[in-house]
Amino acid sequence: MRKLEEVLRDWEAVIGLEIHAELTTLNTKMFCGCKLEFGAAPNTHTCPVCLGLPGALPVPNRAAIESIVLAGLATNCDIEKHSMFYRKNYMYPDMAKNFQTTQGPVAFCMRGHLDLDVDGPAAGERIDLDGVAVGESRGNVTRTEDGYVAHVGITRIHMEEDAGKMVHLGGGEGRIAGATHSLVDYNRAGTPLIELVTEPDLRTPEEARLFMQKLRQIYLAIGISDCSMEEGSLRCDGNVSLRRRGTTGLGTKTELKNMNSFKNLHDGLAYEICRQAEVLEEGGVIYQETRHWDPSAKRTIVMRVKETADDYRLFPEPDLAPYDLTDEFIEGVRAKLPELPHEKAARYAEAYGLSAYDARHLVEHRATAAFFDEAMAQAAGDAARLAKPLANLVINDATGYVNTHDGSDGAPSGFDGVFARLTPARALELVGLVAEDAISSKQAKEVFAAVIADDADPAAIVEARGMRQVSDTGAIEAVVDEVLAANPDKVEQYRGGKTGLIGFFVGQCMKAMKGQGNPKVINELLEQKLG
Ligand code: ADP
Ligand code: ZN
Ligand code: MG
């Protein structure tokens, strides 16, 4: 098989995503009052409605409707005031009703979009932007300084319910193949799910990954789901087809399942693009089928040939009245819309002059953005001056710490653990000490580690460890004079052109000052006296 970058020179990939999110932050199920709880004893959260017993009548969960409307508003969708629930009929033991309640042609949310900022190496997979100037558009993308913005259409977000969970016993690794018997847990049956479907507007695996990441950040920010890809509360299917560069028709697509991490989504699509290219180049045809991405074997395998919509005999759910949303309801939800991550990032860049890179990393986690916001509020008049070093502290030191500590040694872990010790006030104190030259940025790393380990204030640590950097020109000048007097030969050589000796002189001064001299002042004085 050829490499992705080669394949993409001849073929254009067309990708659309279907993304399911469980509304895990709700208290109860979609059409009954059963509790939503992950990991409860099997079949303890069930009732006649979610078990599909004859005569049981569903009642829609208003909080779930609020969540989907919130998701729609956050992704620029039109909110449909009149929509209906439908029955999607199929028989499988995890679905006791023999149908899934879902939505029909009109969903609560229609016609939305997200704009993706693609830059750096991620922009490299898009190879058709040669000759497009910055600010100019081609198709759904607009060129930027270091990449491009892709406008990705969202077809719809509809409401549906999850099925129960099957447990297969007696076989290998919990799989159905080889199992001697299977159990079913209906606790998950009836969990509210929202499914977002994109237009086939994505063109590279990187764009697919970025879309998924951006959507996850939005869902987390609006608080409708815990979005755990490992636990399956956020799931993604990737649809992909190829067409020859320069043509506009749509090829036959395959659908990839099991994309339970950003990496799997990217790598699965990349593999599938290369596989399809090989089939087509050898004169073969692509069948519309569902395939499974196996990350360890690094290939996709056929799961099933696609059933057509008719097989499901979709029809309006007779037990639920058409759903009408009032303007008051929609506006009430709109009022709950928080500042979204990309809006926050734009504000950071605008208000504090942070780079797009820094701003984007700050909003990557809700905890880092909240911490930064709180610190900036406390910094008041110093906010603009301290924003950049504070961003560095959060992005480099705090995030670095979180990524390398799992709490197994009893030390704090996670952003909650780190920020409980660092606190916005201490973070400001720490970057303030560097800004006023009391300590060097290298010393600041040591102080940061001590703040987390000892739960102490930066200034107290600096005092206790005698770290305060000497910036007093008089004191430094005396040391500089001593060092120059002790090394007349080197002074000669320096003046003769060996300016690289500056490092030697700085080192000697630092040594004399036990590492506490302000390197900037030392350098300045040395250059003055040697010049
Ligand atoms: P299906 O009926 O097979 O579920 P849909 O039309 O509902 O297909 O589309 C499902 C997803 O696949 C959407 O995200 C859509 O954008 C995408 N899609 C549709 N046709 C293609 C295609 N030819 N190539 C790639 N993606 C496609
Ligand atoms: Zn129930
Ligand atoms: Mg479909």
Image (spheres, rainbow, N blue to C red):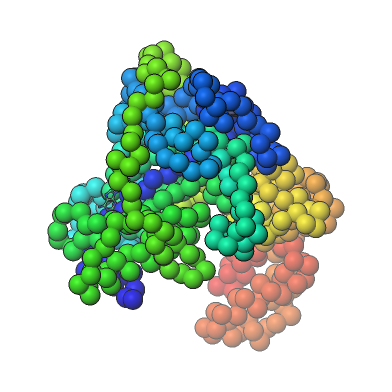
Who is closer to the viewer here, 265 or 210? Answer: 265
Observer able to see residue 468:
no
Q: In this view, does 356 lie above or below 35?
A: below
- In percent of width and height, residue 234 lies at 51, 45
Counting the numbered discs, the total is 0
Q: Furthest residue to the right?
A: 464
- Image-quadrant location for residue 49: top right
Q: Is residue 427 left or right of residue 60?
A: right
In-image side of 423 versus 99 (left or right): right
Q: Locate residue 385: give its quadrant.
A: top right
Q: In this view of the protein, which residue sits in the foreground, 209 or 188?
A: 188
Residue 10, horizontal then vertical, whole percent: 21, 69
Residue at (44% x, 31% y) in the render: 101
- Residue 199 in view (yes/no): yes
Indicate the quadrant containing the N terminus: top left, top right, bottom left or bottom right.
bottom left
Residue 206 position, x and y percent, is 38, 58
> Measuring 53% from the left and 29% from the top, which residue is drawn there?
52
Q: Nearer the viewer, residue 518 or 386?
A: 386
- At 62% across and 69% down in the image, what residue appears? 526
Instruction: Examine the rendered structure and indicate whether residue 282 appears above or below residue 267.
Output: below
**Residue reaching furthest to the left:** 247
Kindly identify the residue that appears in the image at 83 percent across and 57 percent down. 465
Is residue 155 shown left or right of residue 518? left
Quadrant location of the C terminus in the rendered image: bottom right
Residue 197: image x %, image y %? 36, 41
On screen, residue 268 above or below 461: below
Which one is nearer the viewer's eye here, 225 or 294? 294
